[in-house]
Image (cartoon, rainbow, N blue to C red):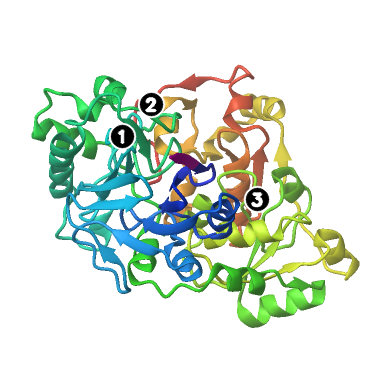
Amino acid sequence: MKIEQIYTGCLAEAAYYIESKGEAAIIDPLRETKPYVDKADRNGANIKYILETHFHADFVSGHLDLANKTGATIVFGPTAAPAYDVHVATDGEELKLGDVTIKVLHTPGHTMESTTYLLIDEKGKEHCIFTGDTLFIGDVGRPDLVQKLKAEVTQEILAGHLYDSLRTKIMPLADEVIVYPGHGAGSACGKNMCKETTDTLGHQKATNYALRADMTKEEFIKAVTDGLVEPPQYFPFNVLLNLKGGMESIDDIIKRGKNPLSAREFEAIWESMDALVLDTRKTQEFTTEHIPGSIFIGIDDSFAPWVGTLITDLKQPILFVADEGREEEVILRLARVGYDHTIGFLNGGIPAWKQAGYETEVIKEISADDFATLYQMDNVHTHLLDARRKSEYESEHLLGAENFPLDFINQNMAQLDRHKKYFIHCAGGYRSVIMCSILKSRGFDHLVNIRGGYKALSQTGLAKTKFVEPKTML
C-alpha cells in the first residue's frame, strides 16, 4: 500500500495518490493531470478511481480531464448530482483498490455532499481518513459557502449537520487513525488551520476546538460560524464549474495561452479584445518598470487566490507578462481557479516592449525610514492606507492609518479621492503593490508604496495601537 500527499502551497491544497497491487486512486485532483498520470505510469499502476470529497469552491478539479485520459471512475458521495456521469456512492459503501478497501462515510456539513473516505489496509485495520473540507488540522470546514448558491441552506443548518457528522462518523474512529485533510494553513475554506497537513485523530480530538467531547450542538454552531469573513468572489463560480462540468481540457488551455506575441501584436490584441494585462513578475521589477494600465499579481506569492479575489470575470481575456520560462506555469495556475482565457504573453518581456517604442511607468516608492520622517513632520498619516485584512489591522496598526483591505478594493474604490495622495502599505510589500497597480489603472495617480510594509514600519519606532475604535472601509 502506498499513500502520497501531493501538496500545492499556492492554494494550500492537498490531493492524494493511493496505490495497492497495481491499482491507484486519486483524491481531489487539481486541474493538471500529468503529475497523476506520470506517477501511476512510473509505478506501473492503473488509475481506477478519482474520489471527490465534495464540489470544490477554491479550485477547479481535474477529475473530468483525468477520467477522460485514464478511464477511471469518478466517485462522489451521497446526494451529489453533477451534470455528468459519475458513480454516486452510498453511505458505508466499500470500494476495492488492490488489497485495500476504501469506505465511503457521508459527512455533510461543509457542503451537503461532503464525504470522508476511510482507508482500510490489507489486514482489515482502519488506517486513515481523507477528510476533504470536513476536518482540517486544528479546524473544520466553513459551513457558509453553499449559501452563495442556495440561500435556503443557511450556515447554521450546515453547521448542525457538520456537528453530527463529526460526532457520528469521525470521532468514533480509533485514535491512531491518521487524518489527511484537503487543505492546510492559508486556505480560505477554514478559519484557523494549522500549518501541519496531517495528524492522528487522537491528537485532533485532544486539541481541535471543534472536536471537544462535551461541546453542545449550539456551542459548536456558534464557534464555527463566528468570525467568518466573506469568501473570495470566485468561489461560487468554481463550484458551478465543478458541478456542471464541460470545462476545456487543460492541454488546450495551455496550448492557446502559450502564444508568444510581439509588442505590436500584444498591444493590438489588448485593444481589440478589451483584454486585461496581468504582470506576474517580481514585486520590485513591476514597481521599477511596467506597462501602463497593467495589473500586478506576482507569481511568487499567493497568486491564484488573489487572481480569484480581484479579477471578477472568469471569462476575461488575459494577456500576461512573465519571466522567461514561466509562461506555462502562469497559464496553469490561472486555470486552476477557473481563468481559462489566457490568449498570449509578451515575447521578450518589458525590454521588447520598450524596443518597440512603447512607454513604461513606475510605482513611486518610499522606504519605511523615510516615511517615518514624513509621518512625524507632515501629518501624511491622514492619507495612509493599510491594505491588510481587517483581522491584521485589528491586531496592531499605525496610529491614524485607515484599513482599506485589498480583498474588497473593487467594492470600496469609490470611497477614495483621486486628487489625494495616498501612502499604502501591507504586511511585507506584495499586496500594497497589487493595490497600487489596480488603483493606478483606474486613474489614481498620487500613490506611494511603502517598501517592506508593516514589518519594516514597525521597526522605525512609529506609534502603533491595538484596535479600539473601528476606522475601516469594509
Quarter holding residue 133: top left
Please tell me which residue lies in front, 214 or 428. Answer: 214
Q: Amino acid at mark 3?
A: His
* In the image, farthest residue toward the bottom: 272
The kind of secondary structure element at disc 2 is loop
Quarter holding residue 325: bottom right
Magenta: main secondary structure equals strand
Please tell me which residue lies in front, 333 or 61. Answer: 61
Q: Residue at x 13, y 49 (%)?
A: 157
Of the image marks 3 and 2, the number of the one nearer the N terminus = 3
Q: Is residue 218 left or right of residue 42?
A: left
Name the disc covering residue 467, or none. Answer: 2
Q: Residues within 10 Å of mark 2 (few under 14, many from 20)?
A: some
* In the image, farthest residue toward the top: 461
The kind of secondary structure element at disc 3 is loop
Name the disc covering residue 446, or none. Answer: 3
Q: Amino acid at mark 2?
A: Phe
Is there a contact, CB below 8 Å, between mark 2 and mark 1? no
Magenta-colored span? 1-5
Name the disc covering residue 378, or none. Answer: none
Q: Position of residue 175 (x, y in %)?
A: 26, 24
Name the disc covering residue 123, or none. Answer: 1
| Residue 474 highlighted magenta (yes or no) | no
Establish if 108 lies above or below 249: above
